[in-house]
Amino acid sequence: MDILELIKQRQEENFNLHKNYLNNQMVNVLQTIGFDRKYERAVGPYLFDHKGDRYLDLLSGFGVFALGRNHPRVVKVLRDVMQAEIPNLVQLDVSILSGLLAEQLQKITPAGLDRIFFANSGTETVEAALKFSRCATGRSKIVYCKGGYHGLTLGALSATGDDYYRQDFGKMLPDFIEVPFGDLVALEKALSCKDVAGFITEPIQGHGVWIPEANYLPDAAALCRRYGTLLIADEVQTGLGRTGKMWAVDHWGVEPDILCMAKALSAGFVPVGAVACRQWIFNKVFNRMDRAVVHGNTFGKNNLAMAAGLVTLEVLEEENLVENAATVGNQILSDLTQLVGQYEYLKEVRGKGMMIALEFARPRSFSLKVPWDMMEAANKGLFSQMITVPLLQRHRILSQVAGHGMNIVKFIPPLTLNQCDRNWIKEAVTDVVADAHRVPGAAWEFGKSLATKAVSMKTTAR
């Protein structure tokens, strides 16, 4: 098979293939909002379409491409591994690459996390963390936060505080308790009976980019210690430099008992996740030789994934990408925060490093309230599409809505953004936000079109 020739011959069929054999509703969404582009090449933080136009990718595969796309050093390492004919997944063996990656991860994770377990994705790391916490403590209950997101497999979904993802999938697992994010009183009440195995939380909630008060995570960690509950930090999205520190918990000096990571560790090439935990927890799970395989997976320690992880850590350090995320990310935050007082729809700009949210809300002016209410009546959170769509169509910037039904636009770009990219973002966001305040205007003609389609889809669904 000449795979490149096959792609070339059938490149124009991508949307039809997905309509016929995959998720046709995703195709409908992309075509409705004008995101049905034909990307043919990707380098660093940029995508290129079939016409050669360059796009700035502020979505980065939901945070996967922290190093940018097709980083040459990663490509070289993966090619070297494939060409070396190294034995892979022998299973009744232990591989050198997984040992080397575990060694490097142990050096950079918070103190006390001395053991590493490899998986294939973020949701798998969460599943492992939930099981490990139950085994280590002898307890069954799990506490999680409203609004949090931990994955879509059943255990991770049971700990995800958003009913949108649960609807129509039946009952969740028992013994899962929801508390408000940032509410220490509710957390202590849930833990006080000393029957909770683990408290799982994202240090910064990804759906909405909600940042807790300064005392929340340190005090939550203290409560966990007091009541014998393990603190599980889900750093699947926030970890490995995303927030301007290696781990988001580092902003508050918190040392969790279990830490989940994935996404960026893959360099965007080979799915990989890892759980870092305290040795005594690991020893409880794998406590005898006949329990050496009591939890595992087939592909978790495959050579390509381990090599991708190793070169990712090397590039993060040698190219100072964590520091760049902090510096350039904070500059972008500063640039966009200046718009808040100028435009009524823009309520707040918040974030850390390269994890940034623009929150929009109902304005004060009557002339702006009317179109806002029209959009919200058609579909909650629809206004945010009036930002993401023109960012793509007029300024070739790919971004996302931060969560279902939210008027929050989220940027999670590669950590490699430079000053030219910063200016690109500033000018584009300023133009799009300003245009949304021109009523009537071209932006609101598009808004009416979106609202009409949203109402039509609701009617059809009924």
Image: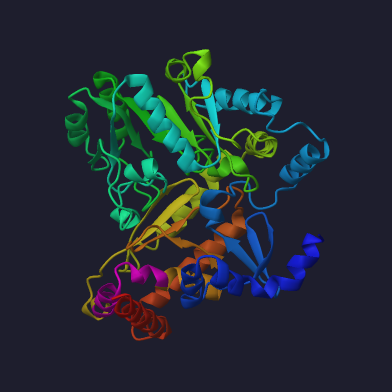
Q: Is residue 457 above or below residue 235?
A: below
On the image, the x and y values in percent for residue 33 come to 47, 75
Q: Is residue 206 above or below residue 138?
A: below
Residue 374: tell me if it is visible: yes
On the image, the x and y values in percent for residue 2 come to 82, 61
Observer-nearest of 359 and 306: 306
On the image, the x and y values in percent for residue 321 come to 60, 41
Question: Where on the picture, by quarter, is residue 135?
Answer: top left
Q: Is residue 102 above or below residue 331?
A: above
| Residue 237 as seen in the image, left or right of residue 364 | right
Q: Say if the magenta span includes residue 382.
A: yes
| Residue 306 as seen in the image, left or right of residue 440 | right
Q: Which residues are magenta?
A: 370-385
Residue 251: tell me if it is visible: no
Q: Main secondary structure of the magenta part?
A: helix
Q: Residue at x 33, y 61 (%)?
A: 406
Question: Where on the picture, by quarter, is residue 393?
Answer: bottom right
Quadrant in which the C terminus is drawn: bottom left
- Outermost residue on the top side: it is 288
On the image, the x and y values in percent for residue 226 come to 25, 19
Observer-nearest of 247 and 134: 134
| Residue 441 as seen in the image, left or right of residue 303 | left
Observer-nearest of 40 and 361: 40
Q: Is residue 260 above or below residue 335?
A: above
Q: Say if the magenta span includes residue 17.
A: no
Q: Residue at x 56, y 54 (%)?
A: 60
